[in-house]
Image (cartoon, rainbow, N blue to C red):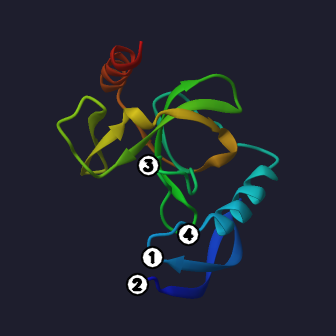
Amino acid sequence: MVYCCKEREQFLVDEQPVLATLVYMEGQKDFDVWNRKKKLLEERKVAPNFSERDIWWCAIGVNVGYEEDGKHQNFERPVCVLRKFNKDIFIGVPLTSIQKDNPYYFPHKLHETEGSILLSQARIFSAKRLERKLGHIGKGRFVALRKQYRNLFF
């Protein structure tokens, strides 16, 4: 059975609240609300300053199939900056609280929460998607992360 629930919810864009009517349908993703949020992200004039090894809340959105989705009202998820190309784009890898004994899951602990960095979900991101900095990965762990990434894909 499919159910539908409408509610007014607020999300933030550049620290400004934006109201949207979210429609939750079991088994379906709400691409319409994400597209409105994405348009507001595109309008950002200045992206935050970031560096390799940083971990940020990143508005990764609602995606297709098994691509990792963002969570909560801002469609965000923690993302580690794996490679910075310039002030506008980077390769990022999303984090999850799920742990698996799998080469595509790099074990990581963030603020006392055990989890993983999802190497199979690495992709290019615009810096306009970065919301709030959470922290960073130590140099030694970052070297190990990049080594595992290279070994898997190159």
Q: Is residue 30 left or right of residue 103?
A: right
Q: Which amino acid does label 1 sit on?
A: Glu
Of callouts 4 and 3, which one flags the residue occurring earlier in the amino acid sequence? Answer: 3
> For this view, does 20 lie left or right of residue 63?
right
Q: Quadrant of residue 118?
A: top left
Task: Classify 10 Å Cα crowding around label 1: few (below 14), some (14-19), many (20 and above).
Answer: few
Q: In this view, does 139 lie to the left or right of 14?
A: left
In the rendered image, which residue does mark 3 sit on? 66
Q: Which amino acid does label 3 sit on?
A: Tyr
Which residue lies under the disc numbered 4? 73
Q: Tell me the crowding category of disc 4: few under 14, some 14 to 19, or many 20 or more residues within 10 angstroms, Cα based.
A: some
| Residue 1 badge | 2
Give the CA distance from mark 4 to mark 1: 17 Å
The kind of residue on which mark 2 rests is Met
Q: Which of disc 1 and disc 4 is earlier in sequence?
A: 1
Q: If the image is split into quadrants, where does the C terminus sit?
A: top left
Label 3 environment density (alpha carbons within 10 Å; few <14, some 14–19, many ≥20): few
In this rendering, the answer to whether 40 lies above or below 22 is above
Q: Disc 2 or 1, which lies upstream in sequence? A: 2
Q: Distance between the residues labelled 2 and 1?
A: 8 Å
At which x and y percent is residue 94?
44, 42
- Residues at circles 2 and 1 in contact by the CB criterion of under 8 Å: yes
Q: Earlier in the sequence, mark 1 or mark 3?
A: 1
Residue 43 x/y as whole percent = 82, 53
Depth-wise, is mark 4 or mark 3 nearer the camera?
3
